[in-house]
Image (cartoon, rainbow, N blue to C red):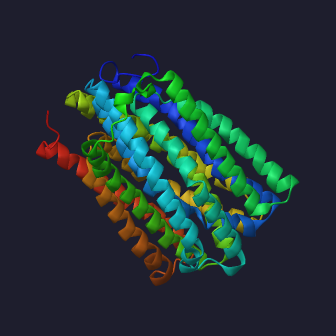
Amino acid sequence: MKNHVTDMTTGSPVRHIILFAIPALIGNVFQQIYNIADSVIVGRFVGANALAAVGATASVTFMFFALCNGIGSGGGIIVSQYYGAHEDDKVRNCIVNTGFIMLIVPVLFGTLGFCVAPSLLRLLQTPLEILPDAALYIRFMCAGLLFVSLYNYLASMLRALGDSRSPLYFLIVSTIINVFLDILFVYKFGLGVKGVAMATIISQFTAAVSCGIYACKVNPYFKLKKSDFNISFKMSYKIIRLGVPMSLQFALIAISSMALQRVVNSYGTVVVAAFTATNRIEQLIHQPYTTLGASLATYCGQNYGANKIDRVYSGYRKSLLIMSILTAVMVVVMQFGGGAITSLFVTDPDVVALGALGLRINSLFYFALGMIYVVRGILTGIGDAFFALFNGIVEVIGRFTLPLFLTSYLGMGATGIWVSTGLVWLLSGGTAWMRYYSHKRKDIIKQR
Protein backbone atom coordinates (compact mmCIF):
# COMPACT_ATOMS: atom_id res chain seq x y z
CA MET A 1 0.00 0.00 0.00
CA LYS A 2 3.00 2.31 0.15
CA ASN A 3 3.33 2.93 -3.59
CA HIS A 4 1.81 6.17 -4.86
CA VAL A 5 0.62 7.22 -1.38
CA THR A 6 2.32 9.22 1.39
CA ASP A 7 1.83 8.84 5.13
CA MET A 8 2.14 12.33 6.65
CA THR A 9 1.60 11.23 10.25
CA THR A 10 5.34 10.73 10.82
CA GLY A 11 8.40 12.74 9.86
CA SER A 12 9.06 16.46 9.39
CA PRO A 13 5.89 18.58 8.92
CA VAL A 14 7.76 21.12 6.78
CA ARG A 15 9.18 18.41 4.55
CA HIS A 16 5.77 16.81 4.02
CA ILE A 17 4.03 20.11 3.36
CA ILE A 18 6.65 21.43 0.93
CA LEU A 19 7.14 18.16 -0.96
CA PHE A 20 3.38 17.83 -1.33
CA ALA A 21 2.92 21.49 -2.25
CA ILE A 22 5.51 21.74 -5.02
CA PRO A 23 3.82 19.33 -7.50
CA ALA A 24 0.41 20.70 -6.48
CA LEU A 25 1.64 24.26 -7.12
CA ILE A 26 2.97 23.34 -10.54
CA GLY A 27 -0.33 21.62 -11.28
CA ASN A 28 -2.39 24.61 -10.18
CA VAL A 29 -0.23 26.96 -12.24
CA PHE A 30 -0.78 24.79 -15.29
CA GLN A 31 -4.49 24.72 -14.55
CA GLN A 32 -4.51 28.51 -14.51
CA ILE A 33 -2.70 28.49 -17.84
CA TYR A 34 -6.01 27.27 -19.27
CA ASN A 35 -7.55 30.62 -18.40
CA ILE A 36 -4.43 32.67 -19.09
CA ALA A 37 -3.96 31.09 -22.52
CA ASP A 38 -7.58 31.91 -23.33
CA SER A 39 -7.10 35.52 -22.24
CA VAL A 40 -3.74 36.10 -23.92
CA ILE A 41 -4.80 34.56 -27.22
CA VAL A 42 -8.17 36.30 -27.51
CA GLY A 43 -6.71 39.57 -26.22
CA ARG A 44 -3.82 39.50 -28.70
CA PHE A 45 -5.42 37.86 -31.73
CA VAL A 46 -9.06 39.00 -31.47
CA GLY A 47 -9.09 42.19 -29.37
CA ALA A 48 -10.04 43.88 -26.11
CA ASN A 49 -13.76 43.14 -26.55
CA ALA A 50 -13.11 39.41 -26.84
CA LEU A 51 -10.87 39.56 -23.77
CA ALA A 52 -13.62 41.37 -21.89
CA ALA A 53 -16.19 38.76 -23.03
CA VAL A 54 -14.10 35.89 -21.65
CA GLY A 55 -13.33 37.82 -18.46
CA ALA A 56 -16.95 38.76 -17.84
CA THR A 57 -17.81 35.06 -17.50
CA ALA A 58 -15.20 34.27 -14.84
CA SER A 59 -17.38 34.66 -11.75
CA VAL A 60 -20.32 32.83 -13.34
CA THR A 61 -18.33 29.81 -14.51
CA PHE A 62 -16.48 29.70 -11.19
CA MET A 63 -19.80 29.50 -9.36
CA PHE A 64 -20.88 26.38 -11.25
CA PHE A 65 -17.45 24.78 -10.95
CA ALA A 66 -17.42 25.55 -7.23
CA LEU A 67 -20.81 23.99 -6.57
CA CYS A 68 -19.45 20.71 -7.93
CA ASN A 69 -15.87 20.77 -6.73
CA GLY A 70 -16.73 21.41 -3.09
CA ILE A 71 -18.22 17.91 -2.91
CA GLY A 72 -15.02 16.39 -4.28
CA SER A 73 -12.93 18.41 -1.81
CA GLY A 74 -15.11 17.27 1.08
CA GLY A 75 -14.73 13.66 0.03
CA GLY A 76 -10.97 14.15 -0.19
CA ILE A 77 -10.75 15.37 3.40
CA ILE A 78 -12.69 12.33 4.63
CA VAL A 79 -10.40 10.03 2.63
CA SER A 80 -7.34 11.66 4.22
CA GLN A 81 -8.77 11.14 7.71
CA TYR A 82 -9.57 7.47 7.06
CA TYR A 83 -6.13 6.98 5.52
CA GLY A 84 -4.48 8.52 8.59
CA ALA A 85 -6.53 6.18 10.78
CA HIS A 86 -5.49 3.20 8.55
CA GLU A 87 -9.11 2.28 7.75
CA ASP A 88 -8.48 1.08 4.20
CA ASP A 89 -11.96 -0.29 3.50
CA LYS A 90 -13.51 3.06 4.38
CA VAL A 91 -11.00 4.85 2.15
CA ARG A 92 -12.16 2.81 -0.84
CA ASN A 93 -15.82 3.16 0.03
CA CYS A 94 -15.44 6.93 0.34
CA ILE A 95 -13.77 7.07 -3.08
CA VAL A 96 -16.69 5.14 -4.60
CA ASN A 97 -19.44 7.17 -2.94
CA THR A 98 -17.80 10.50 -3.75
CA GLY A 99 -17.40 9.40 -7.36
CA PHE A 100 -21.08 8.47 -7.60
CA ILE A 101 -22.09 11.90 -6.31
CA MET A 102 -19.67 13.60 -8.69
CA LEU A 103 -21.32 11.94 -11.68
CA ILE A 104 -24.71 13.41 -10.80
CA VAL A 105 -24.01 16.91 -9.49
CA PRO A 106 -22.13 18.33 -12.53
CA VAL A 107 -24.84 17.20 -14.92
CA LEU A 108 -27.50 19.00 -12.88
CA PHE A 109 -25.56 22.24 -12.46
CA GLY A 110 -24.18 22.15 -16.00
CA THR A 111 -27.71 21.95 -17.41
CA LEU A 112 -28.86 24.77 -15.16
CA GLY A 113 -25.93 26.99 -16.13
CA PHE A 114 -26.46 26.35 -19.84
CA CYS A 115 -30.07 27.48 -19.57
CA VAL A 116 -29.64 30.61 -17.44
CA ALA A 117 -26.33 31.96 -18.86
CA PRO A 118 -27.77 34.92 -20.84
CA SER A 119 -30.05 35.96 -17.96
CA LEU A 120 -27.17 35.91 -15.47
CA LEU A 121 -25.01 38.05 -17.75
CA ARG A 122 -27.78 40.60 -18.20
CA LEU A 123 -28.25 40.67 -14.42
CA LEU A 124 -24.55 41.51 -14.14
CA GLN A 125 -25.02 44.42 -16.58
CA THR A 126 -22.58 42.89 -19.05
CA PRO A 127 -21.92 45.40 -21.88
CA LEU A 128 -24.15 44.61 -24.83
CA GLU A 129 -21.26 44.48 -27.30
CA ILE A 130 -19.72 41.48 -25.51
CA LEU A 131 -22.91 39.75 -24.28
CA PRO A 132 -23.30 37.20 -27.15
CA ASP A 133 -19.70 35.98 -26.92
CA ALA A 134 -19.84 35.87 -23.11
CA ALA A 135 -23.03 33.77 -23.16
CA LEU A 136 -21.52 31.41 -25.72
CA TYR A 137 -18.41 30.92 -23.60
CA ILE A 138 -20.40 30.14 -20.43
CA ARG A 139 -22.54 27.60 -22.26
CA PHE A 140 -19.49 25.77 -23.57
CA MET A 141 -17.98 25.73 -20.08
CA CYS A 142 -21.20 24.31 -18.61
CA ALA A 143 -21.25 21.64 -21.31
CA GLY A 144 -17.79 20.56 -20.16
CA LEU A 145 -18.54 20.85 -16.44
CA LEU A 146 -18.65 17.06 -15.99
CA PHE A 147 -15.09 16.68 -17.30
CA VAL A 148 -13.48 19.34 -15.14
CA SER A 149 -15.41 18.09 -12.10
CA LEU A 150 -14.30 14.50 -12.63
CA TYR A 151 -10.67 15.53 -12.99
CA ASN A 152 -10.84 17.62 -9.81
CA TYR A 153 -12.52 14.72 -7.99
CA LEU A 154 -9.77 12.30 -9.02
CA ALA A 155 -7.08 14.83 -8.13
CA SER A 156 -8.69 15.39 -4.70
CA MET A 157 -8.72 11.67 -3.97
CA LEU A 158 -5.10 11.17 -5.03
CA ARG A 159 -3.92 14.20 -3.07
CA ALA A 160 -5.81 13.04 0.01
CA LEU A 161 -3.65 9.91 -0.16
CA GLY A 162 -0.51 12.05 -0.32
CA ASP A 163 0.01 11.81 -4.11
CA SER A 164 0.21 15.33 -5.54
CA ARG A 165 2.45 14.34 -8.46
CA SER A 166 0.25 12.05 -10.55
CA PRO A 167 -2.51 14.63 -11.27
CA LEU A 168 0.22 17.05 -12.34
CA TYR A 169 1.47 14.87 -15.20
CA PHE A 170 -1.89 14.70 -16.94
CA LEU A 171 -2.65 18.33 -16.29
CA ILE A 172 0.60 19.38 -17.99
CA VAL A 173 -0.27 17.32 -21.06
CA SER A 174 -3.82 18.66 -21.23
CA THR A 175 -2.59 22.25 -20.79
CA ILE A 176 -0.18 21.85 -23.71
CA ILE A 177 -3.09 20.51 -25.76
CA ASN A 178 -5.22 23.46 -24.67
CA VAL A 179 -2.64 26.06 -25.76
CA PHE A 180 -2.06 24.29 -29.08
CA LEU A 181 -5.79 24.10 -29.79
CA ASP A 182 -6.29 27.73 -28.72
CA ILE A 183 -3.80 28.85 -31.33
CA LEU A 184 -5.20 26.46 -33.94
CA PHE A 185 -8.87 27.36 -33.44
CA VAL A 186 -8.45 31.10 -32.86
CA TYR A 187 -5.41 32.15 -34.90
CA LYS A 188 -5.60 29.61 -37.72
CA PHE A 189 -9.34 28.98 -38.07
CA GLY A 190 -10.59 32.35 -36.76
CA LEU A 191 -13.18 30.86 -34.41
CA GLY A 192 -12.71 33.57 -31.76
CA VAL A 193 -14.27 32.98 -28.35
CA LYS A 194 -15.95 29.80 -29.59
CA GLY A 195 -12.55 28.33 -30.48
CA VAL A 196 -11.14 29.11 -27.06
CA ALA A 197 -14.09 27.38 -25.38
CA MET A 198 -13.80 24.31 -27.61
CA ALA A 199 -10.09 24.00 -26.84
CA THR A 200 -10.75 24.15 -23.10
CA ILE A 201 -13.41 21.42 -23.17
CA ILE A 202 -11.23 19.04 -25.20
CA SER A 203 -8.33 19.62 -22.81
CA GLN A 204 -10.47 19.05 -19.72
CA PHE A 205 -11.81 15.81 -21.18
CA THR A 206 -8.23 14.63 -21.79
CA ALA A 207 -7.19 15.40 -18.20
CA ALA A 208 -10.20 13.60 -16.68
CA VAL A 209 -9.96 10.42 -18.75
CA SER A 210 -6.19 10.01 -18.56
CA CYS A 211 -6.06 10.66 -14.81
CA GLY A 212 -8.89 8.18 -14.20
CA ILE A 213 -7.22 5.40 -16.21
CA TYR A 214 -3.91 5.97 -14.46
CA ALA A 215 -5.45 5.98 -10.96
CA CYS A 216 -7.26 2.71 -11.57
CA LYS A 217 -4.14 1.00 -12.90
CA VAL A 218 -1.55 2.29 -10.43
CA ASN A 219 -2.97 3.53 -7.14
CA PRO A 220 -3.75 0.63 -4.77
CA TYR A 221 -6.85 2.33 -3.34
CA PHE A 222 -8.39 2.64 -6.81
CA LYS A 223 -8.03 -1.07 -7.48
CA LEU A 224 -11.57 -1.62 -6.32
CA LYS A 225 -13.29 -4.92 -5.63
CA LYS A 226 -16.96 -5.64 -6.15
CA SER A 227 -17.57 -5.28 -2.41
CA ASP A 228 -16.20 -1.73 -2.50
CA PHE A 229 -19.06 -0.61 -4.75
CA ASN A 230 -21.41 -0.18 -1.85
CA ILE A 231 -23.50 2.99 -2.10
CA SER A 232 -23.69 3.79 1.58
CA PHE A 233 -26.21 6.36 2.82
CA LYS A 234 -24.10 6.93 5.92
CA MET A 235 -20.91 7.54 3.91
CA SER A 236 -22.70 9.69 1.33
CA TYR A 237 -24.25 11.76 4.10
CA LYS A 238 -20.83 12.30 5.65
CA ILE A 239 -19.40 13.42 2.31
CA ILE A 240 -22.33 15.74 1.64
CA ARG A 241 -22.30 17.12 5.19
CA LEU A 242 -18.71 18.26 4.73
CA GLY A 243 -18.81 18.93 1.00
CA VAL A 244 -21.96 21.02 0.78
CA PRO A 245 -20.72 23.77 3.14
CA MET A 246 -17.50 23.87 1.11
CA SER A 247 -19.53 24.07 -2.11
CA LEU A 248 -21.67 26.82 -0.63
CA GLN A 249 -18.57 28.68 0.51
CA PHE A 250 -17.13 28.59 -3.01
CA ALA A 251 -20.53 29.46 -4.49
CA LEU A 252 -20.93 32.41 -2.15
CA ILE A 253 -17.47 33.62 -3.10
CA ALA A 254 -18.51 33.29 -6.75
CA ILE A 255 -21.73 35.22 -6.09
CA SER A 256 -19.72 37.93 -4.33
CA SER A 257 -17.39 38.04 -7.33
CA MET A 258 -20.43 38.44 -9.56
CA ALA A 259 -21.48 41.41 -7.45
CA LEU A 260 -18.03 42.92 -7.98
CA GLN A 261 -18.18 42.09 -11.69
CA ARG A 262 -21.45 44.03 -11.93
CA VAL A 263 -19.69 47.12 -10.60
CA VAL A 264 -16.78 46.53 -12.98
CA ASN A 265 -19.10 46.16 -15.97
CA SER A 266 -20.74 49.51 -15.21
CA TYR A 267 -17.43 51.28 -16.01
CA GLY A 268 -17.25 50.03 -19.60
CA THR A 269 -15.02 47.85 -21.73
CA VAL A 270 -11.63 49.39 -20.81
CA VAL A 271 -12.14 48.76 -17.10
CA VAL A 272 -13.58 45.29 -17.79
CA ALA A 273 -10.50 44.43 -19.88
CA ALA A 274 -8.10 45.78 -17.21
CA PHE A 275 -9.94 43.91 -14.47
CA THR A 276 -9.88 40.72 -16.56
CA ALA A 277 -6.12 40.99 -17.03
CA THR A 278 -5.44 41.66 -13.34
CA ASN A 279 -7.88 38.94 -12.34
CA ARG A 280 -6.00 36.39 -14.44
CA ILE A 281 -2.73 37.49 -12.86
CA GLU A 282 -4.27 37.35 -9.37
CA GLN A 283 -5.37 33.79 -10.08
CA LEU A 284 -1.69 32.93 -10.43
CA ILE A 285 -0.89 34.82 -7.24
CA HIS A 286 -3.49 32.69 -5.45
CA GLN A 287 -1.79 29.47 -6.48
CA PRO A 288 1.10 29.33 -3.95
CA TYR A 289 -1.43 30.09 -1.20
CA THR A 290 -3.95 27.59 -2.59
CA THR A 291 -1.43 24.76 -2.75
CA LEU A 292 -0.04 25.58 0.68
CA GLY A 293 -3.58 25.45 2.10
CA ALA A 294 -4.34 22.21 0.24
CA SER A 295 -1.11 20.65 1.50
CA LEU A 296 -1.95 21.70 5.03
CA ALA A 297 -5.48 20.28 4.67
CA THR A 298 -4.17 16.85 3.62
CA TYR A 299 -1.46 16.94 6.29
CA CYS A 300 -3.93 17.97 9.01
CA GLY A 301 -6.56 15.51 7.79
CA GLN A 302 -4.19 12.55 8.07
CA ASN A 303 -2.80 13.64 11.45
CA TYR A 304 -6.26 14.45 12.81
CA GLY A 305 -7.40 10.98 11.72
CA ALA A 306 -4.34 9.51 13.46
CA ASN A 307 -5.16 11.58 16.59
CA LYS A 308 -1.81 13.44 16.44
CA ILE A 309 -3.11 16.89 17.36
CA ASP A 310 0.28 18.41 18.23
CA ARG A 311 1.42 17.80 14.65
CA VAL A 312 -1.67 19.64 13.40
CA TYR A 313 -0.68 22.81 15.29
CA SER A 314 2.96 22.44 14.29
CA GLY A 315 1.97 22.25 10.63
CA TYR A 316 0.00 25.48 10.96
CA ARG A 317 2.95 27.40 12.45
CA LYS A 318 5.39 26.19 9.80
CA SER A 319 2.94 26.95 7.00
CA LEU A 320 2.44 30.48 8.30
CA LEU A 321 6.19 31.09 8.05
CA ILE A 322 6.33 29.71 4.50
CA MET A 323 3.38 31.91 3.52
CA SER A 324 5.06 35.05 4.88
CA ILE A 325 8.20 34.46 2.81
CA LEU A 326 6.15 33.87 -0.36
CA THR A 327 4.17 37.03 0.28
CA ALA A 328 7.25 39.23 0.60
CA VAL A 329 8.55 38.02 -2.78
CA MET A 330 5.23 38.50 -4.61
CA VAL A 331 4.67 42.00 -3.24
CA VAL A 332 8.02 43.16 -4.63
CA VAL A 333 7.28 41.62 -8.04
CA MET A 334 3.89 43.31 -8.34
CA GLN A 335 5.04 46.70 -7.09
CA PHE A 336 7.79 46.94 -9.69
CA GLY A 337 6.67 44.64 -12.51
CA GLY A 338 2.88 44.96 -12.63
CA GLY A 339 2.84 46.98 -15.84
CA ALA A 340 5.08 44.58 -17.73
CA ILE A 341 2.99 41.61 -16.62
CA THR A 342 -0.30 43.29 -17.61
CA SER A 343 1.08 44.09 -21.07
CA LEU A 344 1.38 40.36 -21.75
CA PHE A 345 -2.41 40.23 -21.96
CA VAL A 346 -3.31 43.31 -23.93
CA THR A 347 -1.54 46.17 -25.74
CA ASP A 348 -4.01 49.00 -25.13
CA PRO A 349 -2.00 51.55 -23.05
CA ASP A 350 -5.03 52.65 -21.00
CA VAL A 351 -5.81 49.06 -20.05
CA VAL A 352 -2.16 48.34 -19.19
CA ALA A 353 -1.84 51.44 -16.98
CA LEU A 354 -5.03 50.72 -15.07
CA GLY A 355 -4.14 47.05 -14.66
CA ALA A 356 -0.68 47.90 -13.29
CA LEU A 357 -2.25 50.25 -10.73
CA GLY A 358 -4.69 47.54 -9.67
CA LEU A 359 -1.87 45.03 -9.12
CA ARG A 360 0.10 47.49 -7.00
CA ILE A 361 -2.95 48.13 -4.83
CA ASN A 362 -3.89 44.49 -4.34
CA SER A 363 -0.34 43.37 -3.53
CA LEU A 364 -0.49 45.41 -0.31
CA PHE A 365 -3.09 42.92 0.95
CA TYR A 366 -1.39 39.65 -0.04
CA PHE A 367 -0.57 38.68 3.55
CA ALA A 368 -4.28 38.73 4.43
CA LEU A 369 -4.97 36.62 1.34
CA GLY A 370 -2.36 34.08 2.43
CA MET A 371 -3.83 33.95 5.93
CA ILE A 372 -7.19 32.93 4.46
CA TYR A 373 -5.70 29.88 2.75
CA VAL A 374 -3.46 28.77 5.61
CA VAL A 375 -6.25 28.89 8.18
CA ARG A 376 -8.74 27.38 5.73
CA GLY A 377 -6.30 24.49 5.22
CA ILE A 378 -6.10 23.54 8.88
CA LEU A 379 -9.83 23.99 9.51
CA THR A 380 -10.74 22.00 6.41
CA GLY A 381 -8.36 19.24 7.45
CA ILE A 382 -10.07 18.79 10.80
CA GLY A 383 -13.52 18.87 9.18
CA ASP A 384 -14.75 22.29 10.32
CA ALA A 385 -17.64 22.59 7.88
CA PHE A 386 -19.15 25.60 9.64
CA PHE A 387 -16.14 27.82 8.98
CA ALA A 388 -16.23 27.19 5.24
CA LEU A 389 -19.80 28.45 5.04
CA PHE A 390 -19.26 31.32 7.48
CA ASN A 391 -16.17 32.49 5.60
CA GLY A 392 -18.18 32.58 2.38
CA ILE A 393 -20.88 34.68 4.04
CA VAL A 394 -18.27 37.16 5.28
CA GLU A 395 -16.86 37.52 1.78
CA VAL A 396 -20.32 38.03 0.27
CA ILE A 397 -21.05 40.84 2.71
CA GLY A 398 -17.74 42.50 1.87
CA ARG A 399 -18.12 42.12 -1.90
CA PHE A 400 -21.66 43.49 -1.90
CA THR A 401 -20.96 46.53 0.27
CA LEU A 402 -17.35 47.66 -0.17
CA PRO A 403 -17.16 48.11 -3.99
CA LEU A 404 -20.21 50.39 -4.13
CA PHE A 405 -19.14 52.25 -1.00
CA LEU A 406 -15.64 52.95 -2.27
CA THR A 407 -16.41 53.60 -5.94
CA SER A 408 -19.55 55.70 -5.48
CA TYR A 409 -19.89 57.10 -1.96
CA LEU A 410 -16.17 57.79 -1.45
CA GLY A 411 -15.71 58.83 -5.08
CA MET A 412 -12.74 56.56 -5.78
CA GLY A 413 -14.11 55.53 -9.17
CA ALA A 414 -12.66 52.47 -10.88
CA THR A 415 -9.67 52.44 -8.50
CA GLY A 416 -12.04 51.52 -5.68
CA ILE A 417 -12.65 48.16 -7.39
CA TRP A 418 -9.14 46.96 -6.58
CA VAL A 419 -9.09 48.57 -3.13
CA SER A 420 -12.32 46.77 -2.25
CA THR A 421 -10.79 43.43 -3.27
CA GLY A 422 -7.91 43.96 -0.86
CA LEU A 423 -10.20 45.01 1.97
CA VAL A 424 -12.34 41.90 1.45
CA TRP A 425 -9.20 39.77 1.80
CA LEU A 426 -8.37 41.63 5.00
CA LEU A 427 -11.87 41.08 6.39
CA SER A 428 -11.97 37.40 5.43
CA GLY A 429 -8.41 36.74 6.63
CA GLY A 430 -9.14 38.39 9.97
CA THR A 431 -12.24 36.27 10.60
CA ALA A 432 -10.32 33.14 9.58
CA TRP A 433 -7.59 33.93 12.10
CA MET A 434 -10.16 34.45 14.85
CA ARG A 435 -11.83 31.14 14.03
CA TYR A 436 -8.53 29.27 14.31
CA TYR A 437 -7.70 30.77 17.67
CA SER A 438 -11.23 30.08 18.86
CA HIS A 439 -10.55 26.41 18.18
CA LYS A 440 -7.28 26.50 20.01
CA ARG A 441 -8.46 28.55 22.97
CA LYS A 442 -11.59 26.54 23.63
CA ASP A 443 -9.86 23.23 22.89
CA ILE A 444 -12.47 22.30 20.32
CA ILE A 445 -9.90 20.14 18.56
CA LYS A 446 -9.98 17.14 20.83
CA GLN A 447 -8.55 13.70 20.70
CA ARG A 448 -11.17 11.36 19.43
Q: Nearer the viewer, residue 255 or 18?
A: 255
> Along the horizontal axis of the image, is 290 left or right of 447?
right
Q: Residue at x 56, y 30 (%)?
A: 213
Q: Position of residue 87 (x, y in %)?
A: 27, 26
Q: Position of residue 430 (x, y in %)?
A: 31, 56
Q: Residue at x 41, y 35 (%)?
A: 295
Answer whether residue 188 is visible to the viewer in this image.
Answer: yes
- From this viewpoint, which residue is outermost toward the top? 2
Q: Position of residue 163 (x, y in %)?
A: 46, 27
- From this viewpoint, which residue is outermost toward the front? 226
Q: Is residue 324 above or below residue 130?
A: above
- From this viewpoint, which residue is outermost toward the bottom? 409
So how many labels did they put on this image?
0
Answer whether residue 367 is visible to the viewer in this image.
Answer: no
Q: Position of residue 6 (x, y in %)?
A: 40, 22
Location of residue 3 by image quarter: top left
Q: Residue at x 13, y 42 (%)?
A: 443
Q: Nearer the viewer, residue 68 or 187?
A: 68
The quarter of the rendered structure image containing the C terminus is: top left
> Along the horizontal axis of the image, is 200 left or right of 311?
right
Location of residue 193 by image quarter: bottom right
- From this viewpoint, which residue is outermost toward the right? 188
Q: Residue at x 26, y 28 (%)?
A: 311
